[in-house]
Amino acid sequence: MTTKEKLENLISNLKRWQKIEDASIDLAEESMSRIQNPLVRSVFQILKHDSEMHRTLQQLVIDSLESESISLTPEDVGAIDDAITRHDEVEKNVVQLAQYTLDDLSGSGYQIQKFLLGYLLDDEKKHDKLLENLKSVKSSLYPYG
């Protein structure tokens, strides 16, 4: 397979993936219109929002492959370095607090609260990982900056 064919295949897959995300968004909206339970409604709102974000990022990747290259300049790195570090510290503190809070419910009958706090903890860990990955990208592009 040539490089051009690989690129075309990649873009095609991303566009198919976007259609799946669109269907997920529509399904979540349709479900939310019928759901009265605040817990279940919140879960579908989360699913909808995540699918919307996935679609946005997929479009960024498509655009970067088709027309608009994405770069990270030394100036960008300088501007984001402090923000990444500070936000990473906040995320680590939130993860720790979320874990303590969830641990406090251990052995209790608060299953719904444990479910919600467990989700929040996982999401905060995901944010922490996202920042770690951004640091890795920055370091791989500018190992001395």
Image (cartoon, rainbow, N blue to C red):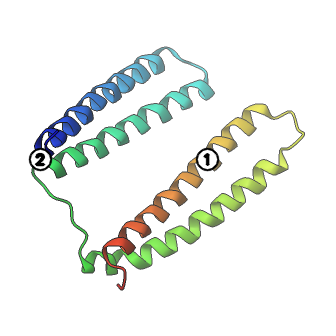
Residue most extreme to the top: 34
Q: Is residue 98 left or right of residue 134?
A: right
What residue is pinned by disc 1? Answer: 122
Question: For this rendering, which residue is in front, 1 or 121?
Answer: 1
Q: Secondary structure at mark 1?
A: helix
Expressed as whole percent of the image width and height from the top left, the position of residue 103 reads: 81, 50
Expressed as whole percent of the image width and height from the top left, the position of residue 136 reads: 42, 68
Q: Amino acid at mark 1?
A: Asp
What residue is pinned by disc 2? Answer: 66
Expressed as whole percent of the image width and height from the top left, the position of residue 84 reads: 45, 71
Q: Is residue 128 above or below residue 76?
A: above
Q: Quadrant of the N terminus?
A: top left
Q: Is residue 17 left or right of residue 27?
A: left
Eye-nearest disc, 1 or 2 = 2
Q: Is residue 56 above or below residue 75?
A: above
Q: Is residue 33 left or right of residue 35?
A: left
Question: For this rendering, which residue is in front, 89 or 40?
Answer: 89
- The CA span between labels 1 and 2 is 34 Å
Expressed as whole percent of the image width and height from the top left, the position of residue 9 reads: 20, 35
How packed mark 1 is, by other alpha carbons closer than 10 Å (few <14, some 14-19, many 20 or more), is some
Q: Amino acid at mark 2?
A: Glu
Q: Secondary structure at mark 2?
A: helix
Q: Quadrant of the C terminus?
A: bottom left
Q: Give the residue displayed 83% in from the left and 44% down from the top.
A: 105
> Residue 30: which quarter of the image?
top left
Q: Give the residue displayed 28% in from the left and 75% down from the top.
A: 76
Q: Give the residue displayed 68% in from the left and 43% down from the top.
A: 118
How packed mark 2 is, by other alpha carbons closer than 10 Å (few <14, some 14-19, many 20 or more), is few
The tag earlier along the polypeptide, 1 or 2, is 2
Q: Which mark is residue 49?
A: none
